[in-house]
Amino acid sequence: MKPVVTVGLDGSPESLTAARWAADEAERRGLTLRLLHAWPSLAPEPVHVPSEIDQNYWAKRLVHNAQAELQKRHPRLTVVGDLVADDAQHALLQAASESEITVLGSRGLELLESYFMGDISMPVVAQAKQPVVLVRAATDKEMPAPTAHAAGHVVVALKLHGPCDDLLDFAFHSAAAQGVPLRAVHGRSLPLHAHAPWGADHDITENMRQDARKHLNQALRPWREKYPHVEVADSIRLESPARAVVEAADGAGILIVGRRRHHPVLGPPLGPVAEAAIHHARCPVAVVPHD
C-alpha cells in the first residue's frame, strides 16, 4: 500500500473537521488520504442493489460526501474511501499500523458527547505505532476550526529525561513543511526545598534553569543543523509540565506531545502532559510514540 494519511469518519462535526485537516496534511506531505468508516454491521458489498435496500447506503453516502468535498478542495489529492465491517477501534488500530499519520476528531473535555474521545480515540492514541493527531471542531464561542495550512507555530513538549528524536523529527518536519516557527517547551516542577517564605529560592531555580537549558540545547542542536531554515524558539518554565505545555499551545497550529511505546502494565498508557494536552489544548494535538 502507498503511504497514506488515514482519518476516521463517523459523520460527526469533529470527524469532518479532522478530515479537512487530514486532507491539508496529506497534500502537503504528498500522500494519499484514506477516509475510513468502520461499523461491525456493514454488509458484504452487494451487486446492483437499489439504494433503498442497500444496508450500506448511509455509510457509503457519508464517505462519498466527504470525499466529494475534499476532492473539490484538493483536486490533485488522491482521496480513497474505505468501508470496513469491523469494530471501529480495531479497524483504526489496523489502519494506524499502515499509515504515516492517523487523524481523529476530538471534543476535548466533552468526552460523553464525542464518538471518538470515549471508547475509540483514547485506545487508538495509546496503542498506535505511528503518530495520531486529534483535531477539535470549533464551538460557537471559538475561532473557526484550524486547518493544516492556516496554522500558527508548531509547539513540541520535551521531557529531556530520555530520547526525544521521534518527537523532534515530527516537529521539525511539520514546521519546515508549513514554513512556520517551532517552539520547544520544557516544564519542570519546583521541588519542595525550593520553596521559601518569600517565594522560590533563586539559587535553586537558577540551577534548574541552567541544567534544563543545557539539555534542551543538546537535544535541539542536531535538528537545528538539519533544518537550518526553521526558526526555533525554546521555553523553559518552572511549573507543572502539563500546565506549561497547555499554556504554551495557546495560539499554536499544532501541539506535539510524546507517548512511550512501552509503558508499565499497571500504569496509565499516557503521561500527565499528553492527557492534559488532549483534554485542554484547543489546537490539533499530535501524540507521537517514542522509545
Image (tube, rainbow, N blue to C red):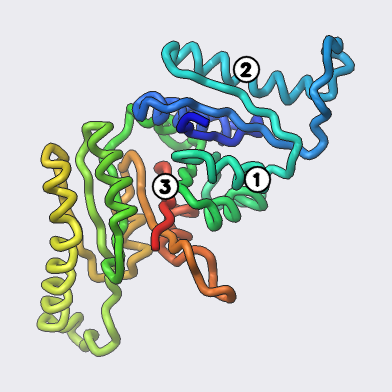
Residue 71 in picture, x, y percent from top left: 50, 14
- Give the foreground label among 1 and 2: 2
Q: CA distance from mark 2 to mark 3?
A: 26 Å
- Residue 291 shown left or right of residue 218 in the figure: right
Identify the residue shown where x is 33% and y is 53%: 166
Task: Report the residue marked by disc 3.
Answer: 286
Q: Element under label 2?
A: helix
Residue 245 in picture, x, y percent from top left: 33, 58
Task: Tell me the amino acid under the disc marked 2.
Answer: Asn
Q: Is residue 213 above or below residue 144?
A: below
Determine the image quadrant of residue 80.
top right
Binning the other alpha carbons within 10 Å of mark 1 as few (below 14), some (14 to 19) or many (20 upward) gives: few
Q: Is residue 29 visible?
A: yes
Q: Nearer the viewer, residue 277 or 196?
A: 277
Identify the residue shown where x is 50% and y is 69%: 263
Residue 113, label in figure: 1
Task: Report the residue marked by disc 2.
Answer: 65
- Give the foreground label among 3 and 1: 3
Identify the residue shown where x is 64% and y is 49%: 120
Q: Is residue 140 visible?
A: no
Binning the other alpha carbons within 10 Å of mark 3 as few (below 14), some (14 to 19) or many (20 upward) gives: many
Q: Nearer the viewer, residue 275 or 266?
A: 266
Determine the image quadrant of residue 40.
top right
The image quadrant where one finds the C terminus is bottom left
Residue 6, label in figure: none
Task: Tell me the amino acid under the disc marked 1.
Answer: Glu
First-in-chain label (1 vs 2): 2
Q: CA distance from mark 1 to mark 2?
A: 23 Å
